[in-house]
Image (cartoon, rainbow, N blue to C red):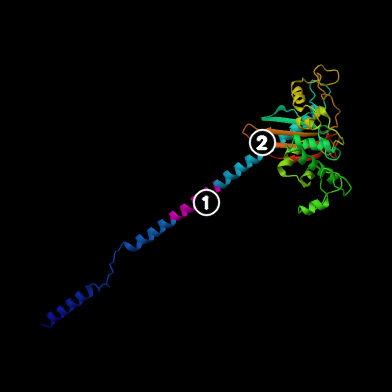
Amino acid sequence: MRTARAIGTTTQGIARRAAPLPACAGERRDPATAPGRSRGAALLLVLWLIALLTALIGAFALTARTENLQGRVMVRGLVAQNAARAGLEYAMTRVAMNDPKLQWQPDGRPHRWRFGDAQLEIGIVDENGKVDLNQGDATVLAGLMQSAGGLEQAEAARLAAAIMDWRDADTLTQPAGGAEDADYASAGRPYGAKDAEFESVAELEQVLGFTPALYEKIEPHVTVYSGRTRPEPAFASKEVLDAIGMNGTQIVEQRRRTQPGSQLPGGTGGGDLPGLVGERSGTYSIDSRARLADGREAVLRAVVRAGGGSMPGMAYTPLRWEEGASSR
């Protein structure tokens, strides 16, 4: 009996030890849960790393492509600028040629030339063919305001007088109106008439009565380099010819039809119209526009004086240099 009781007690102890512990409320145990969560976190981390590397590579590729495009644009821009510069050098060579059939006349007519893969249009004008702001009289200046600026006679005369008041040394207003210091002060300008000669054509914008639109019309036809009271008709534009009382349309048309060399003394193409033979100043306005095959354009506008410059080997002296401007 004692033995049987002992066996029973032992059996009950073993059963109690084998019984599972009570589970907490709401908790379920899965032997695969902990390792699965670790693998999911690792996979998510790898995906984020791949996305980050993809973004970095994409940004690098975009930056490299942008820099490549910028480099190509800069290179093509430099090619176009150098082509325009070559056009200026070529114009100076052609205008100085001794052969009348090859020599260019500096009268503003367009010349086409090909340099590499660039197509150029070059215009060259002798400064003698323009109205000198420091020497032109009131009649010529007023005529230019009418022919090139499209102004009425009274307004043209007033602006011509304002130009003369700007350059003369006295403080007396011109009979046609003009503008001296008191007029500039009344208009709210912080400066008065210069009472000295024009140093550049750009000063014309400061003269009382001039607007940017009017200056743009007048600027191609005026100079400060000729020193002439009257422009040279042989090189003058239609507007300047009209301003000095000549038939600009007729003369310019005859120029266009005249063959190279026939406008020289003794030529057969001069006809009865005056103004085909003139004295050169050696100072030229050159407008060189280059266009590449891909459409890239560069414009160089300069005023140069033939003869050695400050740098050794230069065949001219730059007096005005405007590069990269948009075409007119």
Q: Which of the two labelled residues, at mark 1 and mark 2, occupies the earlier sequence position?
A: 1
How far across and down, in percent of the image, does residue 63 sit? 57, 47
Quadrant placement of the N terminus: bottom left
Give the residue type at disc 1: Leu
Residue 158 belongs to the span the image colors magenta: no
Q: Is residue 9 above or below residue 113?
A: below
Residue 302 placed where, x, y %? 77, 37
Name the side, left or right, on which 19 lies relative to 60: left
Magenta-highlighted residues: 46-61
Nearest to the observer: residue 304 or residue 69: 304
Look at the numbered disc 2 and give the secondary structure of its residue: strand
Disc 2: which residue:
297
Taking the image as drawn, is residue 234 in sight?
Answer: yes
Q: Where is residue 258, by image quadrant? A: top right
Q: Which residue is mark 1?
A: 56
Name the residue furthest left.
Answer: 1
For the residue pair 297 and 52, the one nearer the viewer reads as: 297
Kindly identify the amino acid type of the residue bearing the numbered disc 2: Glu
Q: CA distance from mark 1 to mark 2?
A: 37 Å
